[in-house]
Image: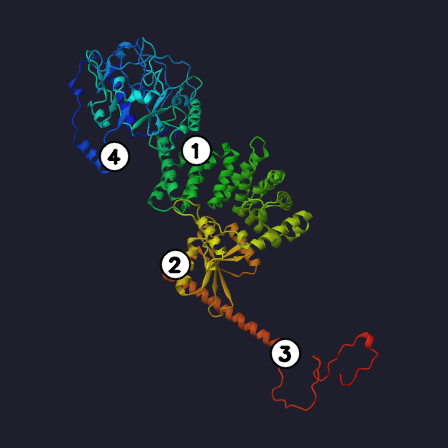
Amino acid sequence: MPGFVDTEDIELRTAQAARDLHVQENSYWCRSEESPSTVAAPVDEWEAELLEWKRQYGCADTAEVPLQPLSFSAQASPKTSYLPSWLHPNSNINEGGGFRPPVQNEVSSDEAAACELVSDPHPDATGSPRFVVPTPSYPTAPVTSLRGMTQLSGTSLSCVSGGHRSPPGPLWPASGSKQVRLDEGPACEPAAAPAAAASPQSGVPTLSSTSPMASLRGRAPPGILRPASGSRSSPPVPIPRPHHPTRLVQAGPVHQLDRSQENTGRRFVYTDEDLDTATEMAKARVMQDGTWRSAHTETGIGKRDFFVDIRRQRSRDKGRQATGPLWVHLAQQAKNMCNEFDLPELLEALKLFCSVRYDDYELYMRILGEIPRYIQQASAVQLCELARLLARRRLRERNYVDMTQAHLLQKIRLTHDHLPAGLLIKTANAFASLECRSNPKFVEHFLRHMEHRIEELDADLCCKVTSLFVSAYMTDALRRAYLKRCAEVQAGFRGPLEDCRHMAQTELILRKEHHSLLSALPAYVGRYLEKMREHASFEKWGTVTLPPHAAPDGPKGSHRTDMEESLQKKVSTAGGSSRVDVFSSEMHQDVSACLDHLGIEHENGVLCGPYLLDIVALDMVNPSKRIVYEVNSAHHYYEGTQLLTGEKKLRQRMLGRLGQKLHMVNHEDWRKLSAANKMTHMLKLQQTQQEENATSLKQQAAANTVRALPALNADRRPTNEPLRLKSVRDLSAPIRVPVPPSRNRQAIPSSVL
């Protein structure tokens, strides 16, 4: 993340110590004699414990840090030394821990010659180890993009630790000499890099990093810089220990590095999009007079930590309803800090809590209470996102819905804030699920706007329109235009099975509730709906509509995927597949478990048109009868109310039209009961319905008895009279045989009579 600062990072703490040293000495390198303080001190008890911990968990004690090979210049001074530029006290690491663009600075040859590296390289002719610092020339154009700070050009090499590129090295700020770049050489060949790093004659040693804490305490283990002889006393400049063993690779784009090592803890490697975003943010903070407007605030740190924590916890707990003390703490933080959030942060916080279905009505009201401050500056996309979040959490708050509709109406009537067709459909579904039509002007303009843009809908977008929006929110003119468009693009026949499910449900609702509209449609639309009906009756299980899932799929649960898998098992022809259960919620499972404990035979998820009945139980007294239970879980109600959602009411209304009598099991009554009381509650429901079924069967039997033919007299004595067919109307009269007209004049024999 651009701008992320880890206060516990060892490299940043080491760089801070080096900067403090620079400020105290008021110069870059002080001349002094060699001090005994530069001798490596023995490890203390704390470091011994750290080494023991590393050995216990298999961590390496030291890491070899191969430096970049350099091409030596004959004109350079033999007294100069080599040091990676990002370790310099005046590096391009700012006070917040981030990197700033390098400044073209210079360093004098006398100051560069005053440093030497204490290590194990082969000595030169004077008997002291020396490094040569190349002095290439670099362009002095100002840096306009952060991407140039992390990508090197030509055949230069980068020191990569754990698959990440090291930060670029700026020039040392000094005066009176040429510009010196201390982290790369101008004539370094990539092919010679491994050999130069491994050859002891190359003059480039391999540093052995030790504990950075020893460097911070003023000690000088092997591998740090100390002043050369004849200079003033100065504490050594520590080289921080890298996170992972480094290696030399060819410099290139970040996305071309080894993907297996891209998450190894290096925070100075970003993608091109991150660098572009950081560049634009940096340009926006520059004032007109050239001053810099800092974005650092005390509250900003708290907000950053809050969003980091909630994003991480949301990625872990997604898939079920979030509970526990950690989410209670995050909710309390959001309540305390929501007055400091801007509109994007308010929407993000609301979205993160809604995605895990966190149950805290006061939290949502607290966040929504801050939105009116920014609603005037909100864009159309942000208003649509707000409406979708209200519908996702089932927050049917009329004031906020009306406020969103009023400002969205202004955006729709203007042409400069255009909404994509897909976002327009999602927003329409959200308003339909909220069942809020208190602003008739908005409803009229919004539906007319959709009617004008109906030609932008393809087959996929037509199938994304919910049946609730078609049934309860559309006008007849928009329904007619929508059905014509569906017939033109053949929606539901060219996409996935989910699209066919939506269209089959829409066809049933239109046939049951809008029959007069269907009779006035063109012939090709009627043929399309008839074909959809035949396809739904042929597929059956393939066009069934799944119940709404309680929570989106995630690491802690996959409710929707489980329902689809259970439905596929029920459709299969394997043995016992018809007894596979499809549960719509955890409360549904609880009710089914109570019926199992009572010994009542039942099935979960029975097909009925395009819907699945929750529970169909067998009447134990009258086996020919069935008892249908409808489970109304917590996510079937609007938040903070006892009112069922629009989708649930539409489902129950259509099941009633299909001839099903539903017996409700409500969440408000169920959650108050203990385990024993739950079974008692279900037993009472079962017995009550069985008594009603028995009473209805007795009444039906009595009605059939009244309508039955009179029975023959069993005490009648037989006679010798011949058997004659008699009329039903009059038992004493003989039956009349119809005579065709051609034989009407012929006499009928008496034997026939």
- Which residue is the site of mark 4? 59
- Relative horizontal placement of residue 255, taking residue 413 as reference (left or right): left
Q: Nearer the viewer, mark 3 or mark 1?
A: 3
How packed mark 3 is, by other alpha carbons closer than 10 Å (few <14, some 14-19, many 20 or more), is few
Task: Tell me the amino acid under the disc marked 4.
Answer: Cys
Q: Is residue 435 visible?
A: no
Q: Earlier in the sequence, mark 3 or mark 4?
A: 4
Q: Earlier in the sequence, mark 3 or mark 1?
A: 1
Q: Quadrant of the C terminus?
A: bottom right
Quadrant of res 72: top left
- Give the residue at x 63% y 84%: 712
How packed mark 2 is, by other alpha carbons closer than 10 Å (few <14, some 14-19, many 20 or more), is few
Task: Tell me the amino acid under the disc marked 1.
Answer: Asp
Helix, strand or loop for disc 1: loop
Distance from disc 1 to disc 2, alpha carbons, whole Å, reads 43 Å
Helix, strand or loop for disc 3: loop
Q: Nearer the viewer, residue 200 or 371?
A: 200
Helix, strand or loop for disc 2: loop
- Which residue is the site of mark 1? 342
Distance from disc 3 to disc 4, alpha carbons, whole Å, reads 97 Å
Q: Earlier in the sequence, mark 4 or mark 2?
A: 4
- Which residue is the site of mark 2? 673
Vertical placement of 323 versus 656: above or below?
A: above
